[in-house]
Image (cartoon, helix red, strand yellow):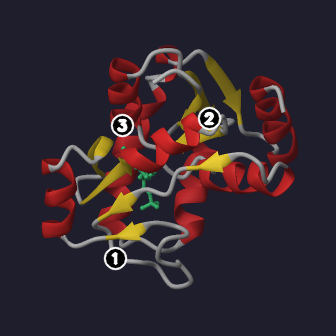
Amino acid sequence: MIGDVTVISGPTAVGKGTVVAELRRRHPQVWVSVSATTRRPRPAEVEGEHYLFLDDAAFDQLIASDGLLEWATVHGSARYGTPAAPVRAAVAAGKHVILEIDLQGARQVFQHLDGVRSVFIAPPDRDALRQRLVGRGTETPEQMERRLVTAEQELAAAGEFEHVIVNDDLGSTVGRLVDLLGL
Ligand code: 5GP
């Protein structure tokens, strides 16, 4: 699949969701993939907008039918994956395609797709990451501890990416992304 595809990854709670939302606000022409997940919706999350919320059987079926470009179990709990058909259609339509996915998914995409642009969003420091994770307040202490362990491992993977952006300020992070994408 040759086209303009950008994988955006980074440790959990680094703020990549916010970065992508702001990118889309400034440049509505970018096409952001909506992932499928077996995670339960959080309050205010909208089906089909934030995620496609699926049960285990429906997710299994997507995998079996080769319907996912990549998928992974994130934080040892829910499964997340990128539906392949919408991405192919967006690439074919010449859109700037953004995949905001975890590191395991990013590695699968690098293996399977040529010519993908890769961006790692890094926290300014580890304390900032911990504070963000605490501040979000949506996880239990056990879930949070597991996410912190995952985040530490993920930080070590920055070198696998073509570009690293330190997310110290939302505006400048998005500005650098805009430059990378040539928007
Ligand atoms: P959350 O549950 O907070 O929405 O997301 C948890 C993690 O799942 C984030 O690190 C996010 O990047 C990752 N994620 C979201 N969608 C996908 C996907 O389609 N594939 C993979 N591999 N990870 C995803």
Residue at point 59%, 41% (across, down): 98
Sequence-first disc among 3 and 1 = 1
Type of amino acid under label 1: Arg
Asked if the beta carbon under badge 2 is closer than 8 A to the nearest atom of ligand 1, the reply is no
Asked if the beta carbon under badge 3 is closer than 8 A to the nearest atom of ligand 1, the reply is yes
Between circles 2 and 1, the one closer to the viewer is: 1
Report the front residue among 180 and 172: 180
Report the front residue among 102 and 23: 23
Residue where numbered disc 3 is placed: 105
Whether residue 150 sits left or right of residue 25 in the image: it is left
Residue at point 87%, 45% (across, down): 171
Q: Quadrant of residue 142?
A: bottom left
Q: Is residue 137 above or below residue 94?
A: below
Residue where numbered disc 1 is placed: 40
Residue where numbered disc 2 is placed: 121
| Spot occupied by residue 21 in the image (x, y as percentages of width and height) | 70, 57
